[in-house]
Image (cartoon, rainbow, N blue to C red):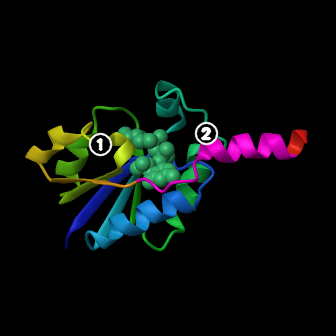
Amino acid sequence: MKKVITYGTFDLLHWGHINLLSRAKELGDYLIVAISTDEFNDIKNKKAYHSFENRKMILEAIKYVDEVIPEEDWEQKVQDVIDHDVDVFVMGDDWKGKFDFLEDHCEVVYLPRTVGISTTKIKKDMLKVNNG
Ligand code: C2G
């Protein structure tokens, strides 16, 4: 069984996230998503609208996702790949090059980001709608 892993906050889930998850799943048979905890989001200077528990529950409902684990720090990826026997590590290409060190342990794939949508854009557009 070919195992794939990806990491992220996945807040205000949108079609760009779904495009990433569906392409990641295409690369194997089993997709693990390591979802950033609220504490790790603080370290990433990201303020998620949904709590970790709710973002995790939402991800677990997606047909492409087989398992969800917590992402608590920048250092856990090598251990995750080893512990979960991962064959492929996938991230959107805004991260291109940042995780090449994982090539000692698994295949590293950066997929083109989906243009035209982001959690930040959703928040900005909603502000405009509400403030007229
Ligand atoms: N993504 C995408 N297209 C978009 C928006 C996001 O392909 N329009 C991808 C990102 O490239 C990432 C994943 O969806 O691979 C999750 O995006 P975020 O939740 O923004 O993840 P991020 O905060 O970048 O966290 O250790 C890695 C970090 O946890 C990544």
Position in image of residue 48 (x %, y %): 61, 39
Foreground mark, 2 or 1, reads: 1
Q: Tag 1 or tag 2, which sits nearer the N-term? A: 2
Residues shaded magenta: 113-129
**122 shown above or below 114:** above
Q: Which part of the image, by quadrant, shows the N terminus? A: bottom left
The one of 10 and 130 positioned closer to us in this rendering: 130
Q: Quadrant of residue 15?
A: bottom right
The three-letter amino acid code for the residue at tag 1 is Lys
Q: Which residue is mark 1?
A: 96
- Residue in the picture at 71% in, 40% down: 124
The one of 56 and 63 positioned closer to us in this rendering: 63
Position in image of residue 89 (x %, y %): 25, 53
**58 shown above or below 127:** below
Position in image of residue 19 (x %, y %): 46, 64
- Residue in the picture at 56% in, 59% down: 57
Q: Main secondary structure of the magenta part?
A: helix
Q: Is residue 61 visible?
A: yes
Q: Which residue is mark 2?
A: 48
